[in-house]
Amino acid sequence: SKCVAGHCTGGVCAMPDNLGCYNVFTEQHDTFEYELWGCTTWTTFTTLVPSPSGIAVPSDNRVYVADFESGAVFAFDKSGARLSRIDTLGNGIVGITFSPGQSLLW
């Protein structure tokens, strides 16, 4: 896509005003909304998570991605190489975060 004064003028933009507003949804309602000001580009980080539903990047620089379908959390290095899989007790996980000391994954 092209940028003109910080606005997307080509490619896929989420909103008609080309500012790139994105909503994050749960099954019940919107959880939050954020806007990207200025043009952005994106690439696919991984295709190994069928239904990504949360992301956390703690200070160890690994990328943890929750999978709604399986309930698993996958750990990747920043290049996108899968490091491990953490199975949880069920599916339907909708987000992840680390504890303040980053010793627990919630």
Image (cartoon, rainbow, N blue to C red):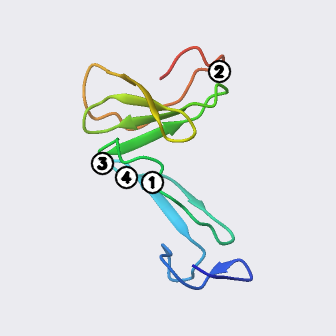
Mark 2: which secondary structure?
loop
Looking at the image, the residue that sits furthest to the right is 5
Left or right? Give the position of 90 relative to 24. Answer: left
Is the Cβ of the residue at disc 4 closer than 8 Å to that at disc 1?
no
Horizontally, residue 74 falls left or right of residue 78, namely left
Disc 3 to disc 2: CB gap under 8 Å:
no
Percent coordinates x, y for residue 3 in the rendering: 67, 80
Residue at the image position 37 percent from the left and 38 percent from the top: 94
Q: Of the residues shown, which amino acid type is indicated by label 4?
A: His
In the picture shown, does residue 91 fall above or below 26? above
Q: Which mark is residue 84?
A: none
**Which numbered circle lies on residue 27?**
3
Q: Position of residue 19 (x, y in %)?
A: 60, 75
Spatial CA distance of label 4 from label 1 is: 9 Å
- Circles 1 and 3, Cβ within 8 Å, touching? The answer is no
Identify which residue is drawn at 62% across, 67% down. Answer: 40
Q: Secondary structure at mark 3?
A: loop
Q: Quadrant of residue 65?
A: top left
Q: Nearer the viewer, mark 4 or mark 1?
A: 1
Q: Which residue is mark 4?
A: 29
Query: In this figure, which residue is indicated by the disc labeled 1?
Result: 24
Disc assigned to residue 100: 2
Which kind of residue does numbered mark 2 sit on?
Pro
| N-terminal label among 4 and 1 | 1
- Residue 100 at what x, y percent from top left? 65, 21
